[in-house]
Image (cartoon, rainbow, N blue to C red):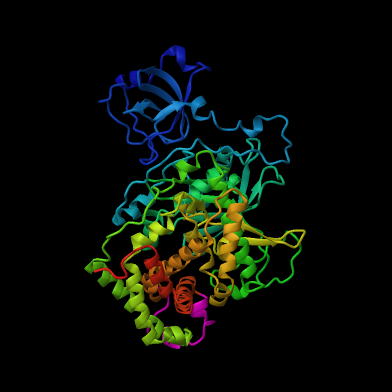
Amino acid sequence: QARARVHSPPPSRASDPMAATWEIVGGADKGGILVREGKDLKSPAFTDRLSTGAMIEELFKEGDRLQYRLKTGSGPKEGWISVRISGKDLAVPAAAANEAEDPPAEDDPNRDPNEAPSKRPPKWRKVDPPEIPFGEIVERAKKSLPGDYYGIKFPHDKDSILKMGPQWLTQAFHKTGVLPTDNAVTKILDAKEFVGGGAGLKCIIKVEYKIDRPYLHKELFIKLPHKPEGSDRYFVSCMWNHDRPETIFNIWLESYIPYKVPKCYFADICAETTNFIVITESIAWSPKGTKEFKPGDVEPAYDKYMDWELPDGGPMYYHACCKALGKIAAYHKAGKLHPQVNDMFPMPPECKEMPKGLPGMNAQQRKESTAKIDGLIKFVSETAKAVMPPEVADKEWLERWKTQALHFLDYQIEVQCFMHGCGTSNPSDYVVLTHNNLQIDNAYFWHDDDNELQVGLLDWGVLACGPLANAVQGCISGAEYKVQLENREDFLDTVLSSYALYGGADLDERRFKQMSDLQLMGWATGIIANVAQVIKHTHPKKEWPEIKDWMDERLVGRFQTRAHVSQFKIALQLWRELDLHHNFLEWLQQEGLPMKKA
């Protein structure tokens, strides 16, 4: 009887059609907010939490305590919650939560049914993911909890996609507004899961709709997290936090980018479980090997570190990507992206002056770096010598490079300050929000009616504010050695011209070239840790002794092996040919830094 009294709403409000509706906005990092059986803060708590994003009907309110009935979302059907704790909103009136959102597309009687409805992103909210120990990742990932932004549970592997089925897809697409409420997903015809790149699992599904419309795609591409067993999931989803920027981009920034990106149907992530999902249209790639294209035909999907597949070997394609980097960065500086983009992706603190008197690596850091460099030298000069250019497999030169690399590593803080614009009148001009990993496999290409190459952009997992020169290196580092050697200055000029043209600052060309040199050295000394990844995927004793040619399938056909070994080769070739250490010594002198550290 006591429990019945707790849950019974006042009779006058039980059927009140004007009862206030609230949205749950707190608890995103905990799977929702706490619900108690009674008004008293000491009354028993329910095991299940009320999901973030849930919509509830107000039954009774006293101070910050509210009795509710669940309308949408998951959690206890009825109970008591606190709408605010320590000045932080846990629930807000639905009208306030949605005041910045567009009205539902289906409520617009004038909309042409063959025109795509307007998407309705949720109100932006910042979520700070908890620190998750490696040993907890498997158990956490087993949970099915609501997403941090849309507040509904979501599948996170192929099996759960099929289990939750068309009903869930319909609910999700209604939630985002891409599918009007008079339409529905009726069937999943096919689902294929595969591994592509290093960011996680992928899945292609084919669907049918109750009503076919020209704006609805029947083939959808889905990004999913790595399987929770093993280290990949922990590094990508926890240590590097690649999944949340991708999710945020697809929910809020997709329509602001001045380039084509795949249409997003649904995206969400759960901080508590590290599960996420991103559903977009599937790009209509031309088949591999296609050589002739009509205007608008998307060229085949090109793989990273396989530039021999590109019709011109690469220059035209990297040029298009560099132009995109500069334009997006300019849009960021000109305030043309989302109004809350600086909350989503904050700028780092400004670095005004070059720090002086900093120590170099300590004994432990030097020991670890030396071991990694020695491992790379052994791999290049012995394990993979047959596929390496003779000039970079030369042990005598590699020993000199080792000394130079360790010298460079003593100045990491000073290098980063320089990359962030220190010493200039406006350091933030050199720090931007743009695509930080725009290599060939994260783009798609087609020619327009004027036969100009156009680029669309994929994969925003490392999106963050950072030095523009870093983003450029992230793009062109995939180009073959000769392509970089012959076109590097043009690539840099293209970025700077595009940045200035569309609203960014007119950056100093000489300084930007120095930044590019330093970032290239940083890349070369950063990849020394990746030998272990190569050995993991291609056995050093059973397979490498038999690999004599770069086109051996055990090298070129395995992404991790091909990518890392290509990086080793290209980085060492460029270091040697560009005499990067000589340029570094000149930079030290220019900045008034000691030529050596104790």
Q: Please give the name of the residue rendered at 33% of the width and 46% of the height, measured from the top-left corner.
A: 130
- Nearest the viewer among 446 and 53 is 446
In this view, 94 is above or below 204: above
Q: Taking 542 as reference, is 104 left or right?
A: right
Res. 176 image quadrant = top right
Q: Position of residue 129 (x, y in %)?
A: 37, 46
Q: Position of residue 320 (x, y in %)?
A: 63, 62
| Residue extending farthest left | 363
- Residue 72 in magenta stretch: no
Q: Taking 149 as reference, is 80 left or right?
A: left
Q: Quadrant of the N terminus?
A: top left
In this view, 361 is above or below 82: below
Q: Please give the name of the residue rendered at 39% of the width and 18% of the height, measured from the top-left corner.
A: 61
Q: Taking 562 as reference, is 208 left or right?
A: right
Let me know if residue 3 appears in the view: yes
- Nearest the viewer among 69 and 222 is 222
- Nearest the viewer among 249 and 520 is 520
Q: Please give the name of the residue rendered at 37% of the width and 72% of the height, measured from the top-left corner.
A: 528
Magenta region: which residues? 536-557
- Residue 542 in magenta stretch: yes
Q: Please give the name of the residue rendered at 29% of the width and 74% of the height, measured from the top-left corner.
A: 370
In this view, 32 is above or below 483: above
Q: How many marks?
A: 0
Q: Taking 592 as reference, is 110 left or right?
A: right
Q: Position of residue 578 (x, y in %)?
A: 48, 76
